[in-house]
Amino acid sequence: MTSKTLAAALVLCGLSATACGGVAAGAGPARTGGAASPAAPPVRTAPAASPVTSGSPATPAAGGSATTLPLSGKVVVVDPGHNGQNHRHPSKINKRVNVLTQWKSCDTTGTVTPSGYSEAAFAWDVSQRLVKILKSRGATVRLTRPDNAGVGPCITERAAIGNRAKADAAISIHADGSGTADHGFHIIMPKKINGPVDPVVGASRKLGLAVRNAYRAGTGEPYSTYIGSKAMNFRSDLGGLNLSTVPKIFIECGNMKNPGDAARFQDAAFRQKAASALAEGLQNYLE
Ligand code: ZN
């Protein structure tokens, strides 16, 4: 790594801290994985928690013939960011994992609104609503964690779940923790890194565009005022994207530190709108 690329990586690190709600739980990064050789295999600490839920089979129509649901045959991986108990297990989530362009924490705690509503809980709730909609449209859906009461899994495993499922699309759901005046949502898509994600960079951009358009139309949430171009942001420092071999994006649904965004996030009707919009975007991409 040249000093130029190192500097770039450090800048991206800073962005990463913002985009994922900042700091990992507990003290600073504890390097437990020995030498930071990028050749070392990614460390996996969490058991694979990946319940599979299949969409309901095509329901016979009144006339007796089966109707084809719009997402029949499609596999979607939904990754609710962080986990509700991450903050209680700093040694687990601070474990270093190899995300190809750098070493990072296994996972982070995520951010929280000023009134204490956590990003992990928000991501879990929106994901649950999204899974229901996708299943009702015939998709096979896999979640990267079974509930909001555990730890992890590591970002490396979150990517691996999508890869093993051979997902047609994967989406990681987050909300940002930026300055209080910052608001709006943005999509994060992978960049080419001379790695496994390269072949799906183009498809991920298409997925990102579809979800961006649907999310804006369906929620009224504006494009981010502080990151990306028209809510589109490309990064090479996220393990969940770098290690994905299937089309994958992150959405930062808004900024939890902004009073307007925070109030919307705490409203179940908004979260339902958000889930519907995400389903719409995924379907537009998949069809
Ligand atoms: Zn996050």
Image: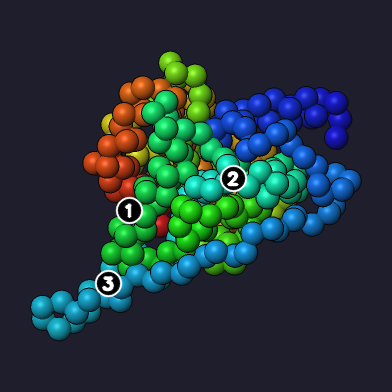
Mark 1 surroundings within 10 Å by alpha-carbon count, few (fewer than 14), some (14 through 19), many (20 or more): some
Identify the residue at image location x=51%, y=58%: 145
Quarter of the image with the C terminus in it: bottom left
* 109 up-or-down from 64: above or below: above
SS state under label 1: helix
Residue closest to the far left: 62
Viewer-nearest of discs 3 and 1: 1
Instruction: Identify residue type, mark 1.
Output: Arg
Does residue 233 appear left or right of residue 126 in this picture?
Answer: right
Q: Choose between 221 and 264: the one closer to the eye.
A: 264
Q: Choose between 64 and 93: the one closer to the eye.
A: 93
Measured from the top left, where is residue 134 in percent x and y? 34, 60
SS state under label 3: loop
The disc at residue 129 is 1
Residue 37 visible in the current orientation: no
For disc 2, the marked residue is: 88
Dot placed on the residue nearer the N-terminal end, 3 or 1: 3
Q: CA distance from mark 3 to mark 1?
A: 22 Å
Residue 23 visible in the current orientation: yes
Identify the residue at image location x=69%, y=58%: 45
**Quarter-wise, where is residue 10 in the image?**
top right
Instruction: Identify residue type, mark 2.
Output: Arg
Does residue 68 appear left or right of residue 176 in this picture?
Answer: left
